[in-house]
Image (cartoon, rainbow, N blue to C red):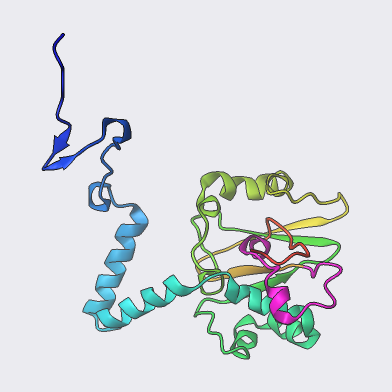
């Protein structure tokens, strides 16, 4: 019997046939989306017109990469413990955030307060406008066509799919973000958290709570 041995090597590297992975395309191999093309064109124009420098643009991108939902959670926790601050946050989020040395960007962000009778939900039906200066990069589901369409047409079903079931006497208000206006939900403080510190309370607040698809529990988020 002859021994059929095949040399699975490429460019000097041995390839285990049991652990072969198909080649993955580089980013350059995939077509640019409309929004990526527009983003690149606007950035090049701003630099060309000397509105900003390439270094300033790089620094801004680096800063945006550091933003997490913890910024928004910090505002929520302060609002839960300071009623006067909550009133200021709802009235003017930018000024209130500045009290915590937080810059939430040039686009106005309206803070919508959940109550026992009203639950707020955020969507952007046209694209994916999102309070990035407070919550960071939006999740993929927020940008999906399904969420953008169904959050408007059947918000209760969408909420239920996220594990949020509301009684019929709770009104659901859906807020459609635009290029000129963003929204953030101020969730209700969970019961049984009176003894928690402000930092502990912030640990209860997730990104999904501030988008409105879920509500905070009484156990700090991991």
At 25% from the left edge and 49% from the top edge, which residue is drawn?
26
Magenta highlight on residue 195: yes
At 64% from the left edge and 50% from the top edge, which residue is drawn?
151
Q: Residue furthest left?
A: 11
The image quarter in which residue 125 lies: bottom right
Q: Residue 96, relative to residue 212: is it above or below?
A: below
Q: Quadrant of the N terminus?
A: top left
- Does residue 70 appear left or right of residue 159 in this picture? left
Front one among 114 and 72: 72
- Does residue 154 appear left or right of residue 188 in this picture? left
- Does residue 117 appear left or right of residue 3 in this picture? right
Q: Residue 51, relative to residue 64: is it above or below?
A: below
Magenta highlight on residue 30: no
Q: Quadrant of the C terminus?
A: bottom right
Residue 177 is situated, as x and y percent measured from the top left of the image, at 57, 63
Q: Residue furthest top?
A: 1
Front one among 12 and 56: 12
Is residue 152 at least partly visible in the picture? yes
Residue 124 is situated, as x and y percent measured from the top left of the image, at 56, 58
The image quarter in which residue 113 lies: bottom right
Residue 205 is situated, as x and y percent measured from the top left of the image, at 68, 68
At 74% from the left edge and 47% from the top edge, which residue is drawn?
156
Is residue 90 at least partly visible in the picture? no
- Does residue 181 appear left or right of residue 39 in this picture? right
Span colored in magenta:
188-211
Residue 55 is situated, as x and y percent measured from the top left of the image, at 27, 81
């Amino acid at each position: 019997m002859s021994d059929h041995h095949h040399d699975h090597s490429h460019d000097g590297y041995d390839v285990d046939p049991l652990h072969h992975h198909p080649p993955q395309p580089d980013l350059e191999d995939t077509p640019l989306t409309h929004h990526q093309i527009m983003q690149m064109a606007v950035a090049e124009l701003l630099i060309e017109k000397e509105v900003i420098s390439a270094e300033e643009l790089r620094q801004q991108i680096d800063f945006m990469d550091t933003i997490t939902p913890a910024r928004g959670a910090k505002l929520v926790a302060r609002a839960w413990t300071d009623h006067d601050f909550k009133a200021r946050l709802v009235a003017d989020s930018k000024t209130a955030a500045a009290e915590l040395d937080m810059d939430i960007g040039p686009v106005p962000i309206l803070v919508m307060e959940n109550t026992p009778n009203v639950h707020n939900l955020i969507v952007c039906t046209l694209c994916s406008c999102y309070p990035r200066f407070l919550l960071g990069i939006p999740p993929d589901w927020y940008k999906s066509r399904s969420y953008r369409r169904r959050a408007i047409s059947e918000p209760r079903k969408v909420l239920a799919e996220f594990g949020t079931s509301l009684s019929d006497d709770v009104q659901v208000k859906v807020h459609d973000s635009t290029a000129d206006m963003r929204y953030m939900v101020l969730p209700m403080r969970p019961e049984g958290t009176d003894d928690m510190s402000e930092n502990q309370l912030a640990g209860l607040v997730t990104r999904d709570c501030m988008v409105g698809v879920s509500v905070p529990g009484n156990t700090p988020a991991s």
